[in-house]
Amino acid sequence: MSFDYRIIDDVIHSRVRLAIMSYLATAREAEFVALKKALKVSDGNLSTHLKKLEEKNYVTVSKNFVDNKPQTKIKMSAEGETAFKAYVEGLAAMIGPAPEENK
Amino acid sequence: MDSPASRSAADDLALIRRMMNAGRQKAAFDGAHLMIWGAVLMVSYIAQYLQVYGYVPGGSLAIWLPAFAVGWSSSFLYGRNACAHEAETNIAVTAYNGAWLAVGITMVLHFGAAVASSVFNPKAITVLACGVIASAFYVISLVTELRALRAVAAGWWLILIFATVQKTYDAEMLLVLAGASALLILLPGQMMRRLAHDKAAES
């Protein structure tokens, strides 16, 4: 099986960041707390991983006020969408075709 | 036998699938539209009940045309305001909006056809309304996995059955529908609104 490991994006490869990207791929946008609950991680842990994704322009983080309360929203960017799609395709290529297809 | 690398990739794919599913089911909408329509329908049914007994003047059109106008315009204004605030859109929100738009269009078309043909069958419109509302709640419950909405859908199916088996369709059915509008539209709307606001407040 020929597989180029370099196509696996190191930024997305971390388990927490992969979970963030997967969630955002279908949710499109999420509030910080909702994301934290879905991932079962701490505030600090989530912030650290979001920062790394933000640095790569895979997500955008916006802060505003709703009913005088701060609200943080995370959205997947077009760049992030492309990178995530490439990552999933890379993983699928790594696993290879189903056993019966190998025969 | 799988190598450790392929096992890890399989785990990652499982994680991706799980998280994508969680994101897909996120109910990120509030129930303001349901509260609006629940209140409008409840008041309209009570007004029609009072009309049957002569406490309110005019015909059915005098009640239902303003009711539809108030409901649609309120929904439109609220929806436009939500869009201005970049409301979240995912499959759950799309299913929610699509389901209720389908209910609204179906009911307006049926009502329009009844008015145009001067054939107004209250039993038929009740059964149709219960059926489409139940289906909308069921579809939303499947997409969002909010189990309480399945109970709401079941409630509407029960009212559909009750309305279908009635031999004489009397004015008291209007009170049943007014109660159903309050309990099975207004209340779920308030529940969903509270869920959405709790999420916002936690942020």
Image: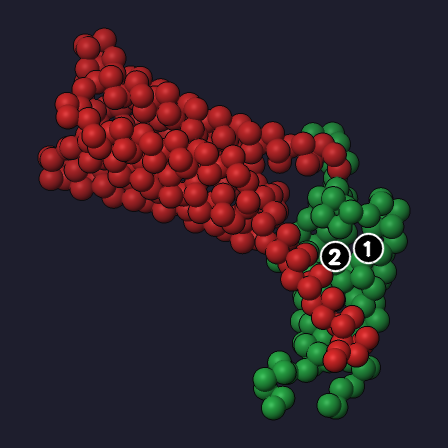
Chain colours: A green, B red
In this rendering, would B169 be left or right of B149?
left
Q: Is there any visible trace of residue A90 in the rendered image? A: no
**Depth order, front residue of B97/A100:** A100
Q: Position of residue B82 (x, y in %)?
A: 56, 41
Q: Within 10 angstroms of label 2, few (less than 14), some, or many (20 or more) residues?
A: many
Q: Position of residue B19 (x, y in %)?
A: 68, 56
Which of the image's four quarters has the C terminus of chain B? top right
Q: Earlier in the sequence, mark 1 or mark 2?
A: 2
State if disc 2 and disc 1 touch (CB < 8 Å). yes
Left or right: where does residue A83 sit relative to residue B141?
Answer: right
Between A93 and B91, the residue placed more toward the observer is: A93
Residue B141 at what x, y percent from top left? 49, 43
Q: Secondary structure at mark 1?
A: helix
Kindly identify which residue carries mark 2: A20
Left or right of residue B182, residue B129 in this image: left
- What is the number of the mark on residue A50? 1
Q: Residues within 10 Å of mark 1 (few under 14, many from 20)?
A: many
Residue toward you, B19 or A64: B19
| Residue located 50% across and 31% down the image | B189
- What is the three-letter code of the residue carrying label 2? Ile
Residue found at x 74% / y 29% = A68
Residue lying at the far top in this picture: please name it.
B55
| Residue B3 appears anywhere in the view | yes
Q: Are marks 1 and 2 on the same chain?
A: yes
Q: Amino acid at mark 1?
A: Leu
Q: Which mark is residue B112?
A: none
Q: Residue, x 49% and y 30% (percent of image)? A: B188
Name the secondary structure under disc 2.
helix
Output the chain of dot 2.
Answer: A
| In this view, A44 is above or below B68 | below
Q: How many marks?
A: 2
Residue B156 image-quadrant placement: top left
